[in-house]
Image: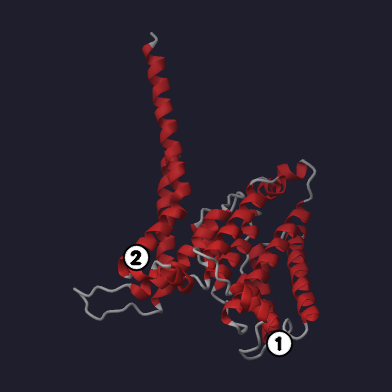
Amino acid sequence: MTVAPQTMDGSASRRTRGINMRRLFRSALPAISLLIVLLAINDFNPRAISYFGFNLMLNLAVPVALATIAQLCVITVSDLDLSIGAYVGFIACVTTTWLPQSPLLGGGVILGSIALYAALGALVQWRQLPSIVVTLGMSFVWLGLALLVRPSPGGESPAWLQSFMGLHVPYVPFPIVAAVVIAAVMHFVLMRTAFGAVLRGAGGNPAAVARAGWSLLRIKATAYAMAGVFGSLAGMSLVGVSTSGDANMANGYTLLSIAGAILGGAEFIGGRVSPIGAVMGALTLQLAAVALNFFQLPHLLPGFRIPSEWQVGAQGLILILILAVRALINRSDA
């Protein structure tokens, strides 16, 4: 009579262990995908896995990681920002036009832009507007403002910004150090503080958060303001790397930021995000684009090189593969 309950307990225990293993594997997917890309680069060109090689391959990873974190702030409250690429381009134009000669004016414009971002979040919540529609419209506004500030590519990068982005850290390349700092800070803010729990709660169960006495209007405004801050840092760091500004220089950042956040484990609804995974996703996408430059099959196709136009396709293929694996894991848990 006692065998049946023990068997049931054992079966339930094995099922729980299986679910935990699948969840652990799902959480490790961003790190696994990054490791696979690094192994592929090492196989194609071992000399790229070096201090100098990582500096070259990841020189644009910091702006992409910052833009991905900006997108993550909006995804945390179950919204989506389709204007972050145009905003990063606008900030780059402001940085190259006013910051070197008129830092007060340039800084004031950037602070005003962050305030406008916060106002957009408040507007989305106040009028119950779809964030996709509002941010899509704002993408044209940011692009138009960027063209007004800088009609043609050029400008000047502040010397201090170039020096900061060109830092040489002993033993570890600066982009990796910056990525670790960004991931650690955002992980602490979003995952380890009461403030982060409220933000994620607003994305997962806004009615419960409102019943607890929190203002959803302020929460949305705060999340969008954070997106504005990280979007501004992305634009400034992009100028520090490229040393010039262009209204269209970050058009691809909108899709890259969404792909990086989703690749890192974020979901569009429910306040489910992972800052560390998002930064890993951004690094994976950046390295995947570089890996194609090394890809060759000398025995089968001598002299064959993958065109650079295929880089976006490769990034999309990686995203589809990761989402397919995650869907299989979720189906197993159901």
> Dot 2 surroundings within 10 Å: few (below 14), some, or many (20 or more)?
some
The x and y percentages for residue 244 are 61, 85
Spot the residue most to the front: 170
From the viewer's perspective, is residue 94 above or below residue 54? Answer: below
User: Which residue is pictured at 33% across the width and 68% down the height?
Assistant: 46
Can you say which quadrant of the picture contains the C terminus? Answer: top left
Res 268 visible: no
User: Which residue is pictured at 77% across the width and 41% down the height?
Assistant: 212
User: Which residue is pictured at 39% across the width and 75% down the height?
Assistant: 310
Badge 2 vs badge 1, beta-carbon distance below 8 Å: no
Observer-nearest of 45 and 110: 45
From the viewer's perspective, is residue 289 above or below residue 201? Answer: below
Q: Amino acid at mark 2?
A: Asn
Observer-nearest of 290 and 216: 290
- Say which label, 2 or 1, has the lower sequence index: 2
Can you say which quadrant of the picture contains the N terminus? Answer: top left
Count of picture labels: 2
Observer-nearest of 176 and 239: 176
The residue identified by callout 1 is 148
Q: Can you tell which quarter of the image residue 254 is in?
A: bottom right
From the viewer's perspective, is residue 29 above or below residue 318? Answer: above
Label ID, residue 42? 2
- What is the secondary structure assignment of the residue under circle 2? helix
Spot the residue most to the top: 1
Labels 2, 1: front one: 2
Q: Is residue 299 left or right of residue 280?
A: left
Q: Can you tell which quarter of the image residue 16 is in?
A: top left
Res 24 visible: yes
The x and y percentages for residue 232 are 68, 71
